[in-house]
Amino acid sequence: MPSSTRVRFDKQLAQLGEDVLQLGSRARSAVERGLQALVREDVDLAREVIAEDVNINRLRYDIEFECYTLLVTEQPVASDMRAIVAALTIVGDLERIADHGKKIARLYLRMTEDPRPIALGEVPALGALTLAMLDRALRSFAARDEVEAEAVCQTDDQADAQYKRTFNAIVSQMVEDPRRITAGTHLIQVAHELERVGDRATNVAERVIYTVTGELIELNI
């Protein structure tokens, strides 16, 4: 029968997992809502995304403190140590994913300062793909599912190819009409932020694999 100390520690680990998933949900929302602000031309939504970032940052640091406390006070065994160390890395990536959402919102606001008609083209599709990668990464974390985590990493090449298509389509519009250069530049930056969401989702998946197997490998190359 597990000791009371082990039961308490398991509850703390479970709470840590829930907190990481909460951060993941809020980071995902930042990206999704930042992209929605662009697609819907919603200035108020963009400002909400930017304002929410301070709360996401605070949650990230709260979880980091939670991890440090567990490491110092509970003397975890090897598998528990991996889970806590992985969580420390994952929350950093999740907070940066939220930053990508904030940057997309800011880019949209800049586009409103000198509005020029430019087609979003493949940008929403790129966003959908990288958000789907993030969803799978978070599911793999919740279930400690190595197979699901590996699937995220395998999707990264698809996201990179989508980004290249998006980039080329935007540049074509800029070449056809130089008046679109400023808006096109901002839109390329949006696409880059979305591509980085996919990269960071892959980072999360790599740490899930480390938690499960003890192998720290780089699949996002």
Image (tube, grey):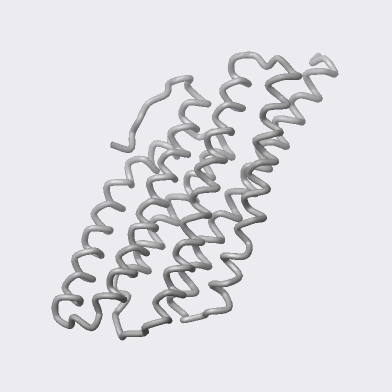
In this view, 198 is above or below 80 = below
**Residue at image location 49% in from the left, 60% down from the top:** 101
Q: Which quadrant of the view contains residue 151?
A: top left
**Residue at image location 43% in from the left, 77% down from the top:** 39
Where residue 83 appears, as percent x and y from the top left, is 59, 27
Q: How many marks?
A: 0
**Residue at image location 43% in from the left, 73% down from the top:** 108
Where residue 68 appears, as percent x and y from the top left, is 68, 27
Quadrant for the N terminus, please. Answer: top right
| In this rendering, position of residue 205 left or right of residue 123 | right
**Residue at image location 70% in from the left, 41% down from the top:** 62
Where residue 47 appears, as percent x and y from the top left, is 57, 72
Q: Depth check: give the residue in front, 108 or 218.
A: 108
Q: Which quadrant of the view contains residue 29?
A: bottom right
In this view, 32 is above or below 57 = below
Quadrant for the C terminus, please. Answer: top left
Q: Depth check: give the residue in front, 197 or 151.
A: 197
In this view, 74 is above or below 62 = above
In this view, 183 is above or below 67 = below
| In this rendering, position of residue 190 left or right of residue 85 | left
Q: Depth check: give the residue in front, 123 or 172.
A: 172
Where residue 183 appears, as percent x and y from the top left, is 31, 76
| In this rendering, position of residue 186 left or right of residue 109 | left
Q: For the view shown, which residue lies furthest in the right direction?
A: 4
Q: For the view shown, which residue lies furthest in the front direction?
A: 113
